[in-house]
């Protein structure tokens, strides 16, 4: 009897005197970098994104209005459920105020849902899918570096202008790949081009031979690659080995990162057109950042995703400073108010749907003879003005956009 | 043995239950709920592996598909959580009936391969079917109100609901194992020919065990969907099938609490080492090798052997 009473007492006392949840200002700013540390996107985001965030914090002086700024990072392994669990833990339990990078759409989507529920900020630099600023948009969620509309649209427009009017798509068989193909098809058709066919390959894939043969026999002038990372690299390498590019067909990568070009080598990648949100060798500002970044990353140059993480984190800190709070919605309003001016974006602005609009660049990969040194890979052919690069706000399906 | 449970086991269970009741005040509740969901999954799996001797390599399909059905019902149809969860369980049981009906005709590696084949088929369906939304999964599923009036949005309320479901399920699974039905299962596991010669319709017993295991795996998947508000490809991927084997082996096959302990161990590693980046998988592998080398019978199995030795030693002295 005694034991039973004691147990009952303990349970009751815990239930009654449990901790009271109260809002307490914690007098610090905490930023989390959630990214792919071990999978196919670890090269273009991963550790480099953590470094970029760290540099942004250091450049800000490590403090905002006297509050220390802390940084945490984790690997979401490209899985939505792990991303969601970590985001929940960070926002609820570890006082994280904003989460940055979020490469891969599935992970970004999972974190977006949690952030929306908690009224916290998410800064998407790595993912590309359009719904992040349309159906899934939120008042505290931002899409910073690029999206499929901008990269696929920019590249496809340029390719068509050069005479690549008939297309065949090689598409990674998941939501992101389908979205990328749809964006490119839209541009191809709008410019009077034709789509001769498409084939979906499993994600991830290492053998593209049968898909490439289908693409070859279609007779299309352009083989559009609606995939990313290692899939793009493998497809281009094998197309080269099959002699597809020598026989008059060209490859158009709809989403290509500088690390992909680095893996391919200039001999394989030369002449390829691509759209990027950032190139390290663009002007004084980008070179200065790249040099500092390279010094701490074994000579690697930053990708657009990593540069975007720097830009988004420093803009976030600036907004915290001016709003004098870490409360999600107030910081987010401030972020929309202030224009973005750093090495990454000139007069960048954030729209109601969370899209950060800045200039994109159309680039061509240099031939080996033109390259003067390591990472000297791109010729910038054209600056695509932000309003042309990104999908117009009037077409947005985001409920936050007033029409 | 003497009765269902000895006095000592009963006390240990009571202590564990007490610990579970106060735990959300000490540890982050969402993490605990994840642990409980996987503990239930591993316990359901253990019914098949530990007590029937059938190694299924396709349990992710029950776990993952139940999550999809619960997510779809909760989000698109907007039904109350209890119906959504029931829908998940029924789906898993139906899948289990279909898969089990075919798979139990084979044993050993062939049984594992048949279940794996079915699981891969369901994985393909999950990628391609429009309602699962492929790589993105079904996200932003509302936690909803249980029976229309208990708000599960509050993490603490949800925790006690998950705990209740877990304890009730574990109690039920334990009853099944202790029942005459469970005794027959063990007999089949130990010597199938003999069970047949004694006149048991072996296949019926196996099929029922398979369906029960599938249904409870589905329950675990549905609960996980309630907790994280999403259903994703990760749950139907064969990695999940492998993970549940790992949990059961680590904790101890054929013991009541073993799989649950194994599940908490694996979930803790994933949770607390996530910051270690690429090292997570390596750490997991290292711990697995370590456990297989040192605790052949799993953590709980080894512990109970050790305790038994200790008590018998005391008795002799």
Image (spheres, coloured by chain):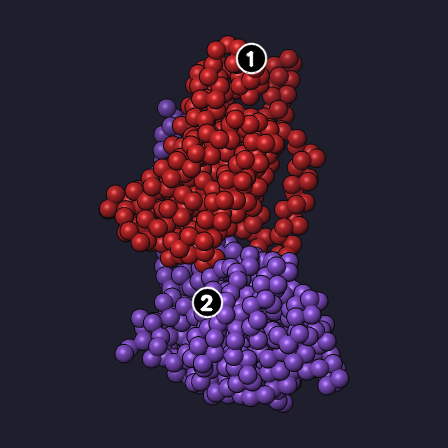
Chain colours: A purple, B red
Q: Residue at x 37, y 57 (%)?
A: B140
Whole-percent x, y for residue A248 in the image: 64, 76
Q: Is residue A219 visible?
A: yes
Q: Residue at x 55, y 88 (%)?
A: A382
Element on which disc 2 rests: helix
Above or below, A397 against B87 in this view is below
Whole-percent x, y for residue A15 in the image: 35, 43
Which part of the image, by quadrant, shows the C terminus of chain B? top right
- Circle 2: is it few (<14), some (14-19), or many (20+) Cα within 10 Å? many
Q: Mark 1, chain letter?
A: B
Work out whether residue A102 or residue A175 is closer to the camera in this orientation and state it. A175
Q: Residue at x 47, y 53 (%)?
A: B127
Q: Which residue is mark 1?
A: B194
Q: Which residue is mark 2?
A: A179
Q: Nearer the viewer, mark 2 or mark 1?
A: 2
Q: Mark 2, chain letter?
A: A
Work out whether residue B165 or residue A168 is closer to the camera in this orientation and state it. A168
Q: CA distance from mark 2 to mark 1?
A: 59 Å
């Amino acid at each position: 009897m005694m034991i039973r009473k004691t147990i009952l007492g303990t349970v009751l006392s815990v239930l009654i005197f449990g901790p009271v949840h109260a809002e307490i200002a914690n007098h610090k700013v905490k930023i989390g970098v959630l990214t792919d540390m071990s999978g196919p996107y670890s090269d273009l985001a991963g550790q480099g994104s953590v470094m970029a965030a760290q540099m942004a914090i250091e450049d800000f002086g490590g403090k905002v209005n006297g509050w220390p700024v802390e940084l945490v990072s984790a690997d979401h392994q490209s899985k939505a459920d792990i991303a969601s669990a970590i985001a929940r833990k960070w926002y609820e339990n570890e006082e994280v105020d904003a989460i940055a990078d979020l490469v891969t759409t599935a992970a970004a989507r999972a974190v977006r849902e949690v952030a929306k529920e908690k009224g916290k900020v998410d800064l998407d630099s790595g993912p590309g899918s359009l719904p992040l600023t349309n159906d899934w948009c939120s008042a505290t969620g931002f899409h910073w570096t690029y999206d499929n509309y901008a990269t696929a649209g920019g590249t496809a427009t340029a390719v068509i202008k050069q005479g690549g009017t008939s297309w065949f798509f090689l598409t990674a068989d998941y939501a992101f790949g389908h979205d990328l193909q749809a964006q490119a098809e839209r541009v191809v058709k709008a410019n009077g081009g034709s789509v001769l066919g498409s084939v979906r390959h499993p994600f991830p894939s290492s053998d593209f031979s049968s898909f490439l043969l289908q693409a070859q026999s279609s007779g299309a002038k352009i083989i559009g690659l609606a995939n990313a990372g290692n899939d793009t690299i493998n497809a281009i390498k094998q197309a080269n080995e099959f002699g597809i590019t020598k026989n008059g067909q060209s490859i158009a990568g709809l989403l290509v990162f500088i690390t992909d070009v680095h893996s391919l080598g200039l001999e394989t990648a030369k002449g390829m057109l691509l759209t990027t949100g950032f190139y390290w060798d663009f002007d004084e500002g980008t070179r200065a950042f790249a040099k500092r970044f390279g010094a701490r990353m074994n000579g690697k140059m930053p990708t657009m995703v990593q540069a975007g993480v720097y830009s988004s984190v420093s803009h976030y800190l600036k907004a915290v400073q001016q709003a004098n709070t870490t409360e999600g919605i107030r910081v987010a309003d401030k972020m929309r108010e202030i224009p973005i001016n750093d090495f990454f974006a000139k007069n960048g602005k954030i729209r109601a749907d969370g899209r950060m609009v800045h200039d994109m660049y159309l680039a061509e990969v240099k031939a080996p003879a033109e390259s003067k040194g390591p990472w000297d890979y791109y010729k910038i052919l054209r600056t695509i003005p932000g309003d042309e690069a990104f999908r117009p706000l009037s077409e947005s399906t985001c409920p936050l956009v007033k029409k | 043995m003497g009765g269902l449970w000895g006095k000592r086991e009963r006390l240990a269970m009571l202590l564990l239950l007490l610990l579970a009741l106060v735990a959300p005040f000490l540890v982050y509740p969402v993490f605990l709920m994840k642990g409980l969901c996987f503990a239930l999954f591993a316990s359901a799996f253990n019914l098949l592996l530990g007590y029937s001797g059938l190694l299924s390599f396709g349990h992710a399909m029950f776990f993952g598909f139940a999550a999809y059905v619960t997510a779809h019902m909760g989000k698109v149809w907007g039904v109350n959580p209890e119906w959504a969860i029931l829908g998940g369980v029924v789906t898993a049981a139906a899948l289990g009936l279909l898969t089990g009906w075919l798979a139990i005709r084979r044993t050993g590696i062939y049984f594992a391969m048949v279940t794996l084949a079915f699981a891969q088929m369901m994985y393909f369906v999950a990628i391609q079917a429009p309602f699962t939304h492929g790589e993105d999964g079904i996200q932003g599923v509302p936690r909803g109100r249980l029976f229309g009036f208990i708000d599960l949005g509050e993490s603490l309320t949800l925790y006690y609901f998950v705990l209740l479901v877990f304890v009730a399920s574990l109690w039920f699974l334990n009853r099944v194992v202790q029942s005459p039905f469970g005794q027959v299962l063990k007999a089949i596991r130990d010597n199938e020919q003999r069970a047949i010669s004694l006149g048991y319709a072996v296949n019926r017993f196996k099929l029922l065990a398979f369906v029960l295991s599938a249904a409870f795996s589905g329950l675990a998947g549905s609960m996980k969907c309630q907790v994280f508000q999403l259903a994703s490809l990760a749950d139907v991927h064969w990695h999940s099938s492998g993970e549940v084997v790992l949990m059961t082996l680590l904790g101890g096959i054929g013991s009541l609490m073993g799989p649950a302990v194994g599940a908490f161990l694996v979930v803790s590693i994933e949770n607390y080492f996530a910051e270690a980046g690429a090292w997570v998988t390596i750490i997991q592998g290292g711990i697995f090798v370590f456990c297989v080398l040192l605790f052949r019978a799993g953590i709980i199995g080894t512990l109970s052997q050790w305790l038994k030795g200790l008590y018998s030693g005391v008795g002799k002295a």
